[in-house]
Image (tube, rainbow, N blue to C red):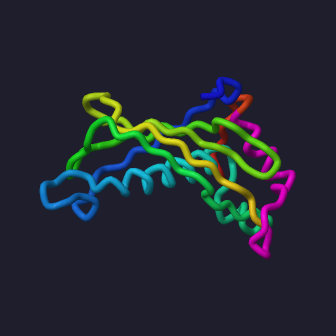
């Protein structure tokens, strides 16, 4: 991970029954959903929401996702999703995640997602300057609650 972005956001998720298989174990694709929760909470903690970003003309599309499974969560477990901005460029960014069992502190999944900014025509474009500046707050460890 890139230490130039020290801010790490914590989101808590409780495993719902619908997220598990017949044995009560979380289905693997749900960890990616939890990464999205972490990412949206991260951005909100910096003072904006995904809806704000879209209204400003920045649509973010996942261009790459990688997950490493180290353990499993089960129905009704509390899970912590730690999210960091790992890289930021004018047209994209990469987030890094650690998904941890809240009670045992065991790391269940490590993951990264790369996103690109798209314009209204769906073509890669530069992020609006104000959105880029909001994301740069993570470099200076300045989280702020959205109003």
Can you name the residue that lies furthest to the right here?
Answer: 129
**Residue at 39% from the left image edge and 51% from the top image edge:** 31
Q: Point out the image quarter for the C terminus.
A: bottom right
Above or below, comparing residue 143 to residue 124 in the picture: above
Q: How many marks?
A: 0
Q: Tell me: 17 left or right of 134.
A: left
Q: Residue 116 versus residue 132: which sits nearer the camera?
A: 116
**Residue at 68% from the left image edge and 30% from the top image edge:** 5
Asked which quadrant contains residue 139, the reply is top right
Can you name the residue that lies furthest to the left here?
Answer: 23
Q: Residue 142 versus residue 120: which sits nearer the camera?
A: 120
Asked which quadrant contains residue 144, the reply is top right
User: Could you say where residue 77 lies in the image, as x and y percent from the top left?
Assistant: 24, 45
* Residue 8 is one of the magenta-drawn residues: no
User: Could you say where residue 113 lies in the image, as x and y percent from the top left?
Assistant: 57, 48
Q: Tell me: 21 left or right of 70.
A: left
Q: Residue 131 versus residue 30: which sits nearer the camera?
A: 30
Q: Which residues are magenta?
A: 119-138
User: Could you say where residue 99 lies in the image, as x and y percent from the top left?
Assistant: 40, 39
Q: Point out the image quarter for the N terminus.
A: top right
**Residue at 69% from the left image edge and 35% from the top image edge:** 138
* Residue 137 is one of the magenta-drawn residues: yes
Q: Tell me: 126 left or right of 105.
A: right
Can you name the residue that lies furthest to the top here?
Answer: 3
């Amino acid at each position: 991970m890139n230490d130039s972005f020290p801010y790490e956001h914590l989101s808590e998720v409780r495993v719902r029954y619908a997220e598990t298989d017949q044995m009560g174990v979380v289905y693997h694709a749900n960890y990616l959903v939890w990464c999205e929760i972490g990412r949206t909470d991260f951005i909100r903690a910096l003072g904006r929401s995904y809806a704000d970003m879209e209204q400003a003309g920045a649509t973010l599309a996942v261009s790459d996702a990688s997950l490493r499974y180290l353990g499993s969560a089960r129905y009704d477990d509390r899970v912590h999703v730690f999210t960091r901005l790992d890289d930021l460029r004018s047209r994209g960014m990469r987030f890094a995640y650690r998904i941890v069992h809240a009670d045992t502190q065991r790391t269940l999944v490590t993951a990264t997602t790369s996103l690109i900014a798209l314009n209204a025509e769906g073509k890669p474009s530069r992020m609006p300057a104000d959105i880029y500046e909001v994301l740069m707050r993570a470099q200076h460890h300045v989280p702020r609650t959205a109003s």
